[in-house]
Image (spheres, rainbow, N blue to C red):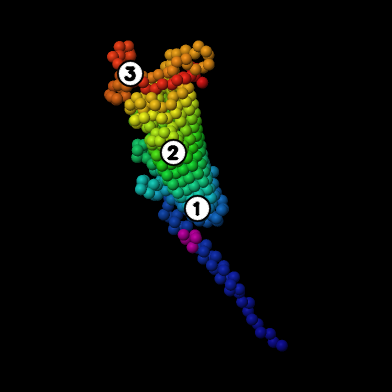
Amino acid sequence: MSHLFIPHQPDLRANRTWSENTGRLFIMLSFLLSVTSLYAWPPLQLYIELTPENGVLRPEPGHYSGPVTITRPITIEGQGKVIVDAEGVGSVLTVVADNTVVTGLELINSGNSFDDMDAGITLKADKVRLEDNVIHDTLFGINIAGANDNIVRHNRISSKDREPALRGDGLRMWNSHDNLITDNRFIKVRDLFLTNSEANRLENNYISHSRIGFELIFSHENKLLNNTIEYNSTGFMVVYSNDLLIRKNTIRHLRSFAGSAMAFKESNNIQILDNKILHCAIGMSANAPLDPENIITMKNNQFLYNDIALYFYGERGGHVLKKNQFIANILDVQASIPEASFYNQWHGNYWDRYEGFDRNHDGIGDTPYQSFLWADRLWVDVPMTQFFRGTPMLETIDFMERFTSFSDPAVMLRDPEPMLNRP
């Protein structure tokens, strides 16, 4: 019986699958070659696209091109050895995927558009962690817009090398709530700016050689704790922001005549506790509260070596000041009109100018401490006279007015139970 020989037929389905995979690989390689020819360094975006959702990307150490956008949750670990350069276009890194983690990257060379807010990192997602990144030579540092429950920790941020007003904000938050901003260093940025952002916690941050440390506008229930601000123009600027806790911050060496370590305008129920304000032009400036129940409470703060420790403006007082220390300030208190200071509630503060006694040894002065409005107001009202501040001439004028005054001076404040010993 003869047999019909039928040659072996290949599996066309397997052949087709092999062809498709080869085609995809060829397309990917072609895309890689075409894209890399457009950039000075390999584009990090390609590696991100090849990383699966919830996967971990650890790029090889080196220099990569941006801008980069993360659209699904992944973890990027640069380990301090990966540089991402936007080459002057847009934000270096944009995160729009929740639950993303970005650590250990160096992000540089953003665009220059204030309208687009070109930044080192633009964050538009929730529950993201940005940690141990270095951001420099970018317009804005970290721009958080409509993003909640994020952690921004241990980052080092600086802006482009410009005058402070021409830089971008080191941190900019808009409509963002319940974020933790901690242990970051902001050097040579413009401001740290929060608007319409509530219930955030900003602690252990260092801000230096910038314009405004923290600027809050319509941002309620935030906590600002244990931050250090130095060599800025202004420390805290709070406008229309209520129910804040400002505690254990150190603000020093703010010498701009127009700036203050802390400035408040129409902001109610502010707790200012345990802060140290050292060697500033103005320690704190505040207006009178709009509602007697909504006040600023200051307790256990230190005001040391300032030109003016406290400045009040408005028609009436109403703030509560207890157990604060006023040491070696040129003026402890100044006001636009005496009543703005006198009607504050002063109690148990330490004044290094107090000249009373403590005969019963209870640590409280036997007589109230009072501060009067003498000629030392001259250099406040006429800035040109600041050149003579502390000179024998102005001191003589002040002494003569105290010694031979033709009318009683206005009383700036009265503390009924001043502390005799510094805590």
353 above or below 50? above
- Residue 169 is a magenta residue: no
SS assignment at label 3: loop
Figure check: 367 above or below 45 = above
Residue to which mark 1 is pinned = 97
Disc 2 crowd, CA 10 A, few/some/many (<14, 14-19, 20+)? many
Question: In percent of the image, x 63 and y 79: which residue is there?
Answer: 7
Residue 21 visible in image: yes
| Neighbour tally class for label 1: few under 14, some 14-19, many 20 plus, Cα within 10 Å | some
Q: Amino acid at mark 1?
A: Ala
Q: How many marks?
A: 3
Q: Which residue is located at x 53 percent, y 14 percent?
A: 361
Q: Quadrant of residue 170?
A: top left
* Left or right of 134, for residue 397: left
Mark 3 or 2: in front is: 3
Residue 242, numbered label: 2
**Of residues 256 and 215, the one drawn nearer to the viewer in this rendering:** 215
Residue that appears at 35% across and 26% down: 339
Q: Disc 3 designates what residue? A: 409
The residues colored magenta run: 27-31
Decide if residue 46 is on the left or right side of residue 372. right
Instruction: List x then y, in percent, for residue 346.
Output: 44, 24
